[in-house]
Amino acid sequence: MVRYRWLITTLVIFSIIELEAGDCSKHFTEINDCDDSDRRAESLRNVNFLVGIAERGANARNEISSEVRECAKDLRIFLEAVDTGETWATKMIDAFGNMPRSFIWGNNFWFSSPELCSDINEPLYISLSPSIPRITNKNLMNMTSPFKVHFQMVYFNYTTPMQADLKQQHEPHIEIGLCVPVQCPKEAITNWAQKYFEDNRFIPQRIYDINMTTVDSKVPEFKSEIFSSTGFILFTLIVVTVSSLAGLAEIMCILKQRRSETHDKDTVATETFRGEKFLRCFSLRENVPRVLQATAPKEFVSILAGLRTIVCLWVTLLHIFYFSMFTMDNILFLYATGETFIQQPVFQACYYVDVFFTVSAFLMTYNLLSNKQRVCEIKSNKWFQNLKLYMKFVIHRIFRLTPVLVLTLVASDFVYDIVDMSSPFYLNEDHDLYCKKNWWYTLLYINNGLSIRKMCLTWSWYLACEMQFYIFFLAIIFIYIKNETVGKAIFITSTLVLMTVSFLCYYSNWNNFPI
């Protein structure tokens, strides 16, 4: 009987314990669910910087600006939609707010295509066959946000031990893209982004030990302001002027042709008016056949044409790499592979420019010394007459090169404004196309004296060097024709001096193009 009592008592105790354990387990599960929910929300805010920045902005309830208050209201709607798993919010955090791969190799572009932000307002559709069963959410492609959104870029200076610190012309920046409500002022988003990354809440930021400071921000879109920019106005004036001159030249040719039909051709051919020679420079019917002419003059050194073509294409290949580096997401990998032996023909193409210097020097010397009439004129002239002739040569070369250089300067300034305005990439005063300050150095052919960060049209250093070489060595050739002994002495002395200076510059800096 005692045994049964103990057995009954034990069963009752175990039943009570089991019931209490069940209740505790239920409560523990609820607590876990709450904790998991909190961790999921916190984890999302710490992994997706779009959500983290939105959380910052959503708390701005007491702002004076009505725009900021409306922005905070929209951001709270977005965060609620993220918590409830609404499709349009999931699409936003799927496309934006994530750190891409290969940060160590230089991928600083933390943004997706701006079209994916536009998809939140105006959905992109895919035509799917209705006869095939699918598990896809039916509203996946056509869900839109309850407020308008747009794409905004925020740019950061940064330091990290987990990425090679290359000393390039273009200082690298971390460029993040955000899909935010249209109501949000650009400055407010930038401020919230700065505070979010200052708190070091972003988990990848802690993993890579990244310190970030905002530099600038923009909403990349094409604006009508571009039509009032200096580059566009000057470019338009040049195009209109050249087109007008080409039209006048065409009218002149038509009138001259009609007169030749009614008058003596020889008489019409000899009749000219002031400015006719200048207008003929813009005549399409005269200049296009000359450009397309395939026959070379007898004194032309044909091998030079092939040599210049090959080297020009070679240098162009290097420039394609170099001048598009600001858009590359694996710049460090490019530098690493560029040091392999097989890549040397491309990445050492900068030394092939010496071929152009050699060809230019050869042609200048060959054309001048082979012209017996010009040589005799220089020999018979006095020093003042030769000085006038020398200045004539120099001015002629300046007039040959400068018009195209001016057009390139203006077009580059216009292109810079377009790219800076409409692209997501960060362009500053160190960019190759930036010519709003130091353009006059380029026009005076002295821009090779500037540092590469301050140079306008960095590739135009070659024109400056060639112009300076032309002025210097043309004077030596004149002296050589007038007095061979003095000319040879000056040439040898200048060659030794230039070689010594070049060696000392290279030796003191070791590498004249540091990265």
Image: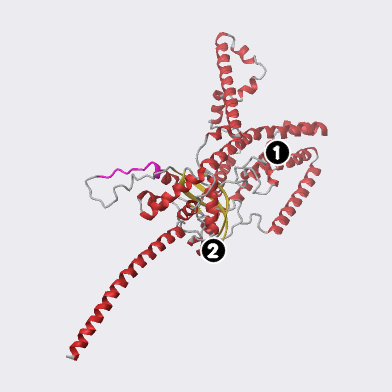
Query: Is residue 126 rendered magenta in the image?
Result: yes
Residue at image coords 26%, 76%: 18
Rendering coords of residue 339 (x, y %): 55, 59
Q: Secondary structure at mark 1?
A: loop
Q: Quadrant of residue 235?
A: top right
Place of residue 361 in the rendered image (x, y in percent of width and height, measured from the top left): 68, 42
Q: Nearer the viewer, residue 405 or 59?
A: 59
Of marks 2 and 1, which one's residue comes earlier in the chain? 2
Which region shows up in magenta?
120-129
Q: Which mark is residue 406?
A: none
Residue placed most toward the observer, 4 or 282: 4
Q: Is residue 326 within the magenta segment?
A: no
The picture quadrant where one finds residue 309 is: top right
Q: Residue beneath label 2, please?
A: 209
The tag on residue 444 is 1
Measure the alpha-carbon separation of dots 2 and 1: 46 Å
List x then y, in percent, for residue 52. 47, 56
Quick one: SS at disc 2? loop
Q: Residues within 10 Å of mark 1 (few under 14, many from 20)?
A: few
Q: Are marks 2 and 1 in contact (CB under 8 Å)?
A: no
Report the front residue among 174 and 154: 154
All told, the count of numbered labels is: 2
Q: Amino acid at mark 2?
A: Asp
Q: Nearer the viewer, mark 2 or mark 1?
A: 2
Quadrant of the rendering where the N terminus is positioned:
bottom left
Most common secondary structure along the magenta stretch: loop
Relative to 110, is 10 on the left or the right? left
Note whether residue 273 is visible.
yes
Query: What amino acid is at disc 1?
Result: Leu
Instruction: Please tell me which residue lies in front, 238 or 116.
Output: 116
- The image position of residue 85, as x and y in percent, is 36, 54
The quarter of the picture where the C terminus appears is bottom right
